[in-house]
Amino acid sequence: MAGGGAPGASAPLRRFVDSVEPLAACLARGGVLAIPTESSYGLAVDPRSRAGVAAIYRIKGRERGKALPVVAASVAQLALLGVAPDAPGLAWAAARWPAPLSLVVPVERPLPAAAGGRELAVRVPDLAPLRTLLERLGHPLTATSANPSGAAPYLTATAVAAWLGGREAIVVDGGALPGGAPSTLVRFGSAGLEVLRAGRYPIR
């Protein structure tokens, strides 16, 4: 697998029902989780962690100026990232969440996941075990696709574990995922709703 860790090594696998303590400890060390999302596995770190965000850019070979999307257990949890309750479009999105629908919102302070900017794409995911995991961890996570930049995302826990290799990483095993389109990405501006990326959530 391109960009993997130590030859022959695989990142350890855990289940949603397992203790979150090893996951929290990995994140605190600047390590990375691979988590199931609605379509594929994603790379997850605390959006406020410089070390964690840097690890994602390094693992993916991703351009560092690109912000990382974020998933949260609830609208209330987004406040930890400086997302104001009256952020443009937040009430509209909240009425549709949980869903594969991401909204670009301003943040009150710079965050590593925002890559030096003042905006983040956020969503409450349409995957109940992931929302429960986010609640148990107590904070949102990034959810950029788990793959080398430009390659197809990984759809199984064993494949992403082999890619991550011997790195400081843990894979949350959610089984084989369906693939397909990513979340729909929208923004609310002066002209109202703007669809930045068509995806799994239909905008009518």
Image (spheres, rainbow, N blue to C red):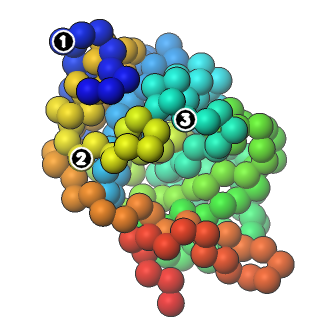
Work out whether mark 2 precedes mark 3 in sequence or the reverse, and give the earlier one.
3
Tell me, yes or no, whether the two marked residues, 3 and 1, touch with CB atoms within 8 Å.
no
Q: Position of residue 184 (x, y in %)?
A: 49, 69
For label 2, the SS is loop
Q: Earlier in the sequence, mark 2 or mark 1?
A: 1
Q: Position of residue 23 (x, y in %)?
A: 37, 25
The residue that mark 2 highlights is: 155
Which residue appears at 49% of the width and 73% of the height? 198
Q: Nearer the viewer, residue 10 or 105?
A: 10
The CA distance from mark 3 to mark 1 is: 24 Å
- The residue that label 3 is drawn on is 62
53 left or right of 127 in image: right
Q: Which is more N-terminal, label 1 or label 3?
A: 1
Q: Amino acid at mark 1?
A: Gly
User: Looking at the image, do the residues carrying marks 2 and 1 touch, with CB atoms under 8 Å apart?
Assistant: no
Q: Nearer the viewer, mark 2 or mark 3?
A: 3
* Residue displayed at 24% across by 47% down: 155
Tell me which residue sits at (46%, 39%) in the image: 149
Residue with the mark numbered 1: 8
**Amino acid type at image mark 2:** Leu
Q: CA distance from mark 2 to mark 1?
A: 20 Å
Circle 1 Cα neighbour tier, 10 Å, few/some/many (<14 / 14–19 / ≥20): few
Q: Which mark is residue 107?
A: none
Vertical placement of 69 versus 164: above or below?
below
